[in-house]
Every structure is written in C-alpha cells, then in structure tokens.
Amino acid sequence: MRTRIKICGFTCAEDARHAAQSGADAIGLVFYPPSPRYVSLDSAKKIAAVIPPFVSRVGLFVDASVEVVRQVLHAGIVDVLQFHGNEPPDWCRQFDRPYIKAIRVQSGLNLLQCATDYADAQGLLLDAWVDGVPGGTGARFDWQMIPQKMPLPWVLSGGLSVDNVAQAIRDTRPWAVDVSSGVEQQRGVKDRMKITQFVKEVQRADN
C-alpha cells in the first residue's frame, strides 16, 4: 500500500504548486484566524487555482461557524473538510461533504470509540494533544496508543519531519501522513526543499 501525503498550512500559491508537483496527494488550507497559517478566502482561491487535477484541496476549520464553512464551500475551492476542534459528529456531517475529523491524542482517549462516533468520516487524523493549541504544534504523541486495527482509515500527524517520517510509517503503517511545521522555514512559510525531501522519505518508506 502506498502511503498518501497531505501537506497542510499553505499561504503561498507557488509553494502549494510545488508540493503537488513533488507528489503530495492533498494540500491543506487553514481557515482558522489565530493560526500563523491562516488564509483569507481570496488568498485561498489563488492557491486552489494552481492545484492540478487529482490533488485534493482540504479546508481546515477549528470550531468555525456554519456560515464560515458554507462560505468556503460556496467558493468551490475545497474538496474535503477537516474539522480540528470540538465539533460533534452531527455537526460535521451537516454539510454533505466528505470530512476528516482530527483527534488530539492524549492518555485515556479511546480511539476506537472516536472511530465509532465519527463512523461516516472519510478518516480520522491523529494529532498530538497540546493544551490550548488545536494543531500545527510540531509535537508528537505516543504512537503505541494507536490500536492495531482501526475501523476507519487514519492519518498520522504531529511532529513529523524529513528526519522521522520514514520510521514513523514503518512503525505505525498509517493510510496517510500529514505535515505542516515539519516542512517550514518559519511558522507559516514553507520550505520547498523540505517538501521535496519529505515526499521522497515517504516514498522510501513504502519501498
């Protein structure tokens, strides 16, 4: 099985185009104003416009209003929704659009129950719990907390980089990996060389 690759948090169209050309399967656009990777709707349109066919455009939201999500959907710039806050299942499914639910993993969390609760999600994105921060922290969680047989496809996120993604894939065998801060020059600014190398490391792990 080939490990899919999502690179999240683009603020520059040319960086997103480079990621797609390098082999990323999905690019993420952050519609969460407190994030250093936040993009306005106008900026998101420019980024989405350069993404080639068959590369998914994922819109990331954190406890957003229904109106904000619908505004992005109406613009026609995302294919998949990613909910990274405390959104309950009924709220996530109201948009009639494929969605991914991010789960911030911490001690005592039952991931199998999460998979049952969000059974109609395309998958779960497993990220590290950092108090007060919904994601993009570069922190890693204990991968041994992931059940061997998850009933939903799942995405490994949190603390991934060029240096550790190959081993992470070998250790956990996720459906996909998601990286943001691990391929940046600085917060909110992507490093194209790191993007290229990250994709190569994922491909190396699959061989």
Image (tube, rainbow, N blue to C red):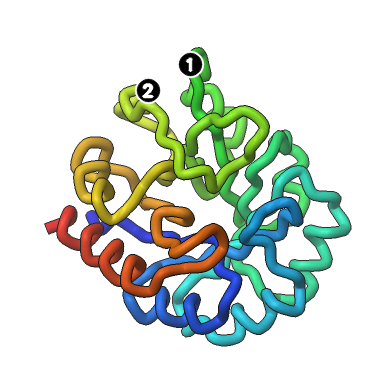
Quadrant in the picture for the N terminus = bottom left
Relative to residue 112, is residue 30 depicted above or below? Answer: below
Identified by mark 2, the residue type is Met
Residue designated by label 1: 107
Q: Could you say which disc has been placed on residue 145 in the image? A: 2
Q: Position of residue 160 (x, y in %)?
A: 36, 47
The foreground one among 163 and 31 is: 163
Instruction: Specify few, some or many for label 1: CA neighbours under 10 Å numbering under 14, 14-19, or 20 or more.
Output: few
Residue 82 visible in the displayed image: yes
Tag 1, which secondary structure?
loop
Q: Are discs 1 and 2 less than 8 Å apart at CB?
A: yes
> Measuring 52% from the left and 43% from the top, which residue is drawn there?
137
Q: Quadrant of residue 130?
A: top right
Identified by mark 1, the residue type is Ser
The reply, left or right, for residue 59 in relation to residue 108 is: right
Q: Earlier in the sequence, mark 1 or mark 2?
A: 1
Residue 154 visible in the displayed image: no
Q: Position of residue 151 (x, y in %)?
A: 42, 34
| View extreme (top): residue | 108
Tag 2, which secondary structure?
helix
> Measuring 83% from the left and 59% from the top, which residue is drawn there?
68
